[in-house]
Each structure stands twice: as C-alpha cells, then as structure tokens.
Amino acid sequence: MTQGSDGHYEVVWPVAERRLITRPLARRLDSLRGKTIAQLWDYLFAGDAVFAALEAKLAEAYPGIRWISWREFGSTHAVNEKELLASLPQRFRELGVDAAISCMAC
C-alpha cells in the first residue's frame, strides 16, 4: 500500500478480448449402430491398444459398427500434421465417416 492510499486499488481484468468466434457443436449421432467411425491417433503412448479395446467393446454394444483404422490417416502429430488435419473433412467424406475418435492414450 502506498502512503496516502485508502486501501482501494484499481483492478484490471487479466483476460483479453475474445477473438475466437464460437460455433455450434456438430449434431450428435443417435447411435453408433451401423456407423463408420474413423480412428485418429498421434502415435504416442498406447493408442493402438486403446483402439483395439474400443473396437471390441463398442462392437458388442453397437452391431454393424465399421472402423477406419488410424493406419489409414497417419500420425496426427507429425511433420505434416497441419496438412493432414486440414485434409480430414474431405477424407471423411470420401470414406463415408460418420464420426471420429481422436486418441492420445495417456
């Protein structure tokens, strides 16, 4: 406290002005039954084991689920990650993907 201060201080809010425009979330699937699910992985930790477990469990709950392996897309954390991620919407359309699971498997 400086001399002569009455104990009141000016306060500055430490958050910057919002620059990102928020968008509505994508419509959620009513079920995974018969859907095509893409697997995305950064090739770190144990994503391959996580996807194997997910495939087994989700196939029990949702018959007809079809998987497009993480091997189809390559690492999402690689030298070309910006290009790879930018290409995903088109690749998903080409492959008939209904949803994706992105795994980092920590």
Image (spheres, rainbow, N blue to C red):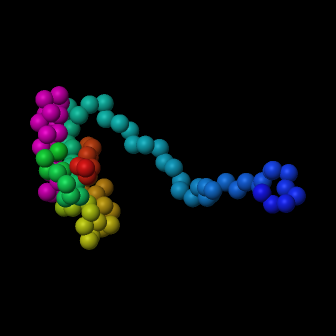
Q: Which residues are magenta?
A: 51-72
Is residue 27 within the magenta segment? no
Compare residues 22 and 17 and report the one nearer the observer. 17
**Hey, which residue is sitting farthest front in the picture?**
3
**Above or below 67: residue 34:** above
Residue 26 is at least partly visible in this image = yes
Residue 90 is at least partly visible in this image = no
**Hey, which residue is sitting farthest right in the picture?**
4
Quadrant assignment, res 34 = top left
Question: Residue at 26% of width from left, 46% of height from top?
Answer: 100
Compare residues 44 and 70 and report the one nearer the observer. 44
Quarter occupied by the N terminus:
bottom right
**Hey, which residue is sitting farthest bottom in the picture?**
79
Compare residues 5 and 12 and report the one nearer the observer. 5
Measured as percent of width and height from the top left, residue 78 is found at 25, 67
Question: Residue at 70% of width from left, 56% of height from top?
Answer: 12
Report how many numbered discs are placed on residues in the image.
Answer: 0
Measured as percent of width and height from the top left, residue 104 is found at 25, 52
Measured as percent of width and height from the top left, residue 106 is found at 25, 50
Quadrant assignment, res 76 = bottom left
- Is residue 20 rendered to the left or right of residue 82? right
Is residue 71 within the magenta segment? yes
Q: Main secondary structure of the magenta part?
A: helix
